[in-house]
Amino acid sequence: MIRPILRYPAPILHQKADDVPAVTPEVVTLLDDLVQTMHAASGVGLAAPQVGLSQRMFVIDLSVGRSPSDLIALVNPTFVRRDGMQLEEEGCLSVPGFHATVARPLHVVIRGLDRSGQERTIEAHGLLARALQHEMDHLDGILFIDRLKPVQRRLILRRIERLRKRGQW
């Protein structure tokens, strides 16, 4: 099922998500919903808080649906290691139409549960590392705009406020 994606400043986007007690059939259904919603929006990642659910889970697919083996679904993920640094442009399905350069570690190792409830460790560099960190941020109530320099952030927030006043946000 395709779910509506919440936009900034929805309150749940700024809250730390709750741990998932167990990977149940309902959790697997939600992961499937996240995948369908992400693909419908042509996104590369989507976290449960973005569809209004305070649950620590996300999906990532850098192939945008073209390669099923590229799909990552993690429940209760945690960082094992982060190092290096990369500066690249990011966007977000909850802040559509806006992009900015964000500093993030170049290399990450993340551990979580897969859709079958088995522990999985992912080591990633570059774009996948960036995507994993972006989605992990969503689980902690952080949006990419929160990581920007104050001047950049204010500029984007002013533009969003103008769009809201015109009923376009």
Image: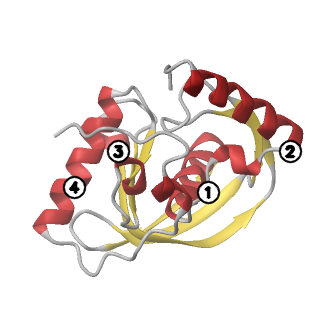
Give the secondary structure at mark 1.
loop
Give the secondary structure at mark 3.
loop
Percent coordinates x, y for residue 20 in the rendering: 32, 75
**Residue visible at 50% across and 19% down in the picture:** 168
Q: Amino acid at mark 2?
A: Lys
In the rendered structure, the answer to whether residue 93 lies left or right of residue 53 reads right
Percent coordinates x, y for residue 73 in the rendering: 34, 55
Q: Which residue is mark 2?
A: 149
Percent coordinates x, y for residue 161 in the rendering: 65, 30
Q: Which residue is mark 4?
A: 30
**Residue visible at 58% across and 24% down in the picture:** 165
In the rendered structure, the answer to whether residue 89 lies left or right of residue 13 reads right
Q: Which quadrant would the N terminus be assigned to in this image? A: top left
Find residue 71 and name its label.
3
Marks 2 and 1, how far apart in space? 14 Å
Q: Is residue 103 above or below residue 157?
A: below
- Foreground: 26 or 12? 12
- Judge depth for marks 3 and 4 and give the one in front: 4
Q: Amino acid at mark 1?
A: Ile
